[in-house]
Amino acid sequence: MAGSSNPLFQKDLYPVPGWSVLTFLGFAALIGGMAIWLLPDRSLLPLLSAFFGTGLVAVLISVSPLGLADGARALGLRPVGWRPVVLGVVGTTILSFAVSQIGVQPEGVRQVTDSVRDPAVLIPTLLVLAVLAPVVEELVFRGLLYGWVAGRWGPLPAFVVSSLAFAAAHAEPAHIVLVLPLGFWFGWLRWRTNSLWPTLITHMINNAFAVLGAAYLAGS
């Protein structure tokens, strides 16, 4: 199939300017520091809400000078067919099952599992970890970072750098090992479709399954 007719091989790219990345870093540090300092409850869920909420605000500020249309294009928010989304969900499900067989449970995952023992926490946890967190992670790593690296050095370095940065951001060694395959899978989808939608939707579905699975295990 010719590349121009295959939604997995779109090539058009609107690069992210370097000042957008610097703006994001500056505002993320400033707003994040203030938010955590002012946070009255520093338990897991409020901290995660403040952290990812800060990231979302910082991303929006960083691309706002580009305007709505160009900012969305720079972040990879371009239309894409349903096939890459289905491919993303199927591939992610297989990868998630495979890495779960390693038998390693990061401390962060254990804390989430413990927290969702309380049914009242399940919906807020889903909103933070299955909606807010994947949206911010995709906008930052496969939107802002990918777009900047691809604009300077091309899509292959952008694929590698964004995938490694995504895994490294999970900090805990066990968690890095578990999410690295997903990072490369998401990065490949971003590269081949030149759209953020397949990874964004797939990431949200994957996290929702993970939280619901943790809730099920906690209640069993």
Image: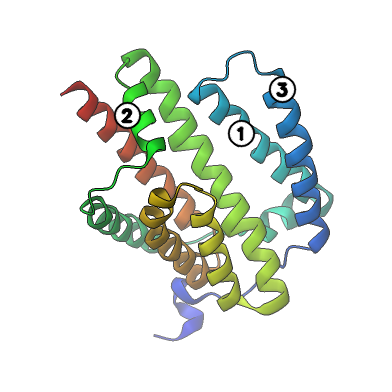
Which residue is labeled 3 in the image?
Answer: 37
| Residue sitting nearer the eye, 138 or 80 | 138
Residue 32's place in the image compared with 135, above or below, is above
- The amino acid type, in three-letter code, at marker 2 is Thr
Mark 3 surroundings within 10 Å by alpha-carbon count, few (fewer than 14), some (14 through 19), many (20 or more): few
Which residue is labeled 2 in the image?
Answer: 113
Mark 1 surroundings within 10 Å by alpha-carbon count, few (fewer than 14), some (14 through 19), many (20 or more): some
Residue 153's place in the image compared with 103, above or below, is below
Residue farthest to the left, as pictured: 220
| Residue sitting nearer the eye, 76 or 24 | 24
How far is the residue under mark 3 from the one under mark 1? Answer: 12 Å
User: In this rendering, does residue 201 appear at all?
Assistant: yes
- Return the x and y of residue 119 as percentages of the image width and height: 31, 15
Closer mark to the observer between disc 3 and disc 1: 3
- Return the x and y of residue 135 as percentages of the image width and height: 54, 43
- Return the x and y of residue 170 as percentages of the image width and height: 49, 48
Q: Which mark is residue 51?
A: 1
- The image quarter containing residue 34 is top right
N-term mark: 2 or 1: 1
Q: Quadrant of the N terminus?
A: bottom left
Q: Residue at x 64, y 78 (%)?
A: 154
Secondary structure of the residue carrying numbered label 1:
helix
User: In this rendering, does residue 77 appear at all?
Assistant: no
Secondary structure of the residue carrying numbered label 2:
helix
